[in-house]
Image: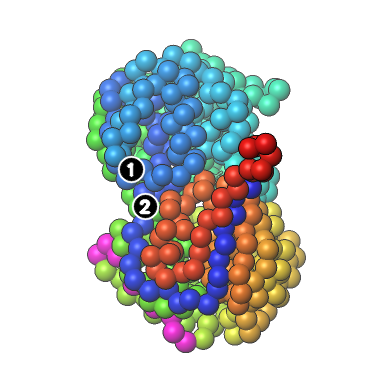
Amino acid sequence: MDTIIVKGGNRLKGEVNISGAKNAAIAVIPAAILSDGVCHIDNIPNISDVFTELETLTCMGATVKMKTANSFEIDTRGLRNVAPPYELARKMRASYYFLGALAGRFGEASVPMPGGCDIGVRPIDQHIKGFEALGAKVDTTGGIINLKSDRLLGAPVYLDVVSVGATVNIMLAAVKARGMTVIENAAKEPHIVDLANFLNTMGADVRGAGTDTIKIRGVASLHGCSYALIPDQIEAGTYMAAVAGAGGEVLINNVIPKHLESISAKLEEMGAEIVEYDEAILVRRTGPLNRVNIKTMPHPGFPTDMHPQIAAVLSTANGTSIINESVWENRFKYVDELKRFGANIQVDGKIAVIEGVEKLKAAPVRATDLRAGAAMIIAGLMAEGTTEITHIHHIERGYENIIEKLRALGADICLKKDYGDVTNAAG
Ligand code: UD1
């Protein structure tokens, strides 16, 4: 099993470039199924979730060409199969976006129940409610979601909970449905706006993305396009947290500072200095860290996907911090791992109480999910001694070149490859 080795104690210094947004990429890639032409997509991050989706498209009959490291050409005109392969679909949460995209193009889809990070029960009732409102019949027996419709028709859909995934899926199903779909209580995350912009670049009529109400007037066809994804809000936030935790001064390039406001505000409260530029953000932390309280909320609130990284930083802040996780019911699995570093954290339901300790001490730990893995790296950078992190496939799902990027900032971090039992293999 490959591991990440981090020797703590180095302050971070220099500049880092943020990659394209993971959660935008994994919505936009299946959306290319809706196009009658070729889609050129730039700023796609090199992460395993992206490669899983591109492989899924290829298996289903699409042609995918890598033009440069972060630029892909997707041609789905030859795609005929409406059932993504089980083994690929099970690898990631976002495989459910194939449902909306295939429904939008063929009126039918057959997709295994999704995998992804284990951060609590992850129901899809709001997705199904949306598809049914548009006239589809949905059946979930045997762990497969089967969707069928003669003709999707635009309809009003009120989401009972603000769901990113349901908002994306209903948008995908509705862009080519006949008539108007109105999603009320829609998610407002930056990647929802990015998906709407991508669809509109292909000729769709989607308005209001980024607000509570999204109106989608169905169009008969969508053409090919060229599109560049937005930068990754959570990757940027993770480097901001790393600087706050390890100390130092880093210019984080290729960001949209507006997307980072809730994170910047908390880091400032914690004693970091933040300077915003047009497309960059400078983070400096030299003094002690202050305690803060955080409640995660849908955008524009503090993102749940930044909570484990901030918890790692708060583990050495002065005083008692409280994190209230209001989006996911079971996002605290990483706490036991942080405790191995000597962090003092008590969890009660959706609340974590963090008593700051003077310093963290290196330990062998596990990445329990994607953002928890990022938190382990941050704790490793802060800790005294050498930390070994296992289960790093979670980290590879969502962070492009994280080891190289941190090394360029002065971190003592490397990948330890496991080549299996070489002696036996040779014998
Ligand atoms: C997306 C992100 C994930 C992030 C989350 C919240 C992707 C691939 N993943 O996940 O990183 O943590 O948004 O910002 O973009 N819910 C229901 N019924 C549903 C759907 C959701 O009750 O049908 C609930 C969930 O249990 C959860 C809340 O709504 O409590 C938010 O879930 P949702 O926004 O759908 O998360 P994802 O789209 O899965």
Q: Please name the residue that numbered disc 2 is placed on.
A: 19
Where residue 80 sits: x, y (%)? 44, 14
For the residue marked with disc 2, what is the amino acid? Answer: Ser
Q: Please name the residue that numbered disc 1 is placed on.
A: 70
Q: Is residue 375 above or below residue 95?
A: below
Question: Which image quarter: residue 213?
Answer: top left
Q: Nearer the viewer, residue 35 or 169?
A: 35
Element type where label 1 sits in the image: loop
Q: Nearer the viewer, residue 263 or 126?
A: 263
Element type where label 2 sits in the image: loop
Question: Which image quarter: residue 215?
Answer: top left
Q: Label 1 to label 2, Cα distance in Å?
A: 9 Å
Q: Is residue 279 magenta?
A: yes
Q: Is residue 336 above or below residue 391?
A: below
For the residue marked with disc 1, what is the amino acid? Answer: Asn
* Residues tagged 1 and 2 counted as in contact (Cβ below 8 A): yes
Where residue 199 sits: x, y (%)? 32, 34
Q: Nearer the viewer, residue 51 or 117?
A: 51
Query: On the rendered structure, is 408 left or right of 226?
Result: right
Tell me which segment is drawn in magenta: 278-287
